[in-house]
Structures are given as structure tokens and as C-alpha cells.
Image (tube, rainbow, N blue to C red):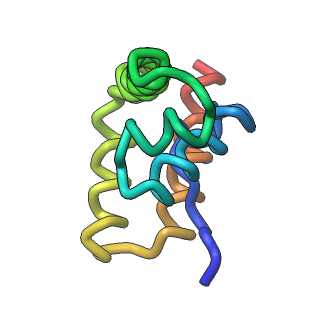
Amino acid sequence: MSINFIPAWMKKLNDEDINFIKIFVLSSGSLKEVAKKYNVTYPTVRIRLNKLIEKIHIEDLEEQDSYVKLIKKMALNKDITFDSAKILIQEYRKTKKGE
């Protein structure tokens, strides 16, 4: 299985963010386990997680366009394919830039 549609917030993540998420998931969400793997304290990991959460929230706020939200919702509900959603969003953004 491959990912055909990557959300904008994921595209903004750097390698360090992705590695942190991977370790977090493989640690079953245990911040204590993540701290052990990084050899840092729990509060250090908590701060890192909070920064990552904020980064994702910021991207979500930038993605407040109701048309884009509708298309994404339709794709998630399988009303349209992810490929169709991606094309519609790309074309919509092109027209918005041209205004």
C-alpha cells in the first residue's frame, strides 16, 4: 500500500519530526520510552512533542479554506477518490493564485 495523498501538514515536517513520530509510535505513545530512546528527560520529550503539535496546528490554521476542507472530507468519506481530490485542490489553488 502506498500513500497517494499526503496532507499539507505532513509535507511541512522535517526528517527530525518524522523520526520523532516514528519513535513515538513504535514506543506505543509512551513519552517515557521515547525519552529513554533519545537518552533525554521526560520534560525534554514533552517539550519536543508540544512543538510538533504546535507545528501541525499552525499548518491546519493555514488550511482553513472551506472548499479545500470540503474536498478533503469528500475524499475521506470516499465520495471521491484521493487522486481526484488532489487534482481538484491543485487546480483550485492555481486559480486562487491567479486572482
Expressed as whole percent of the image width and height from the top left, the position of residue 25 reads 46, 55
Give whichever of 65, 41 is nearer the camera. Answer: 41
Q: Is residue 1 above or below residue 35?
A: below
Q: Residue furthest right?
A: 15
Image quarter (top left, top right, bottom left or bottom right) of the C terminus: top right
Residue 23 or 91: which is nearer the viewer? 23
Estimate the x, y position of residue 30 in percent, counting from the top left.
35, 46
Give residue 9's position: percent from left, percent from top: 51, 36
22 to 60, vertically: above or below:
below
Tell me if 85 is positioned left or right of 31 in this view.
right
- Give coordinates of residue 34: x percent, y percent: 49, 40
Is residue 59 shown to the viewer in this render?
no
The answer to whether residue 85 of the structure is visible from this angle is yes
Quarter of the image for the N terminus: give it: bottom right
Q: How many marks?
A: 0
The residue located at (28%, 35%) in the rendering is: 66
Which residue is at the front of the view, 79 or 15?
A: 15
Q: Residue at x 61, y 69 (%)?
A: 4
Left or right for 79, reference 16: left
- The residue at the point 29 percent across, 75 percent down is 79
Residue 88 position (above or below residue 57): below
Instruction: Work out whether 52 lies above or below 11.
Output: above
Which quadrant of the figure has residue 17? top right
Along the viewing direction, whichever of 35 and 63 lies nearer the viewer: 35
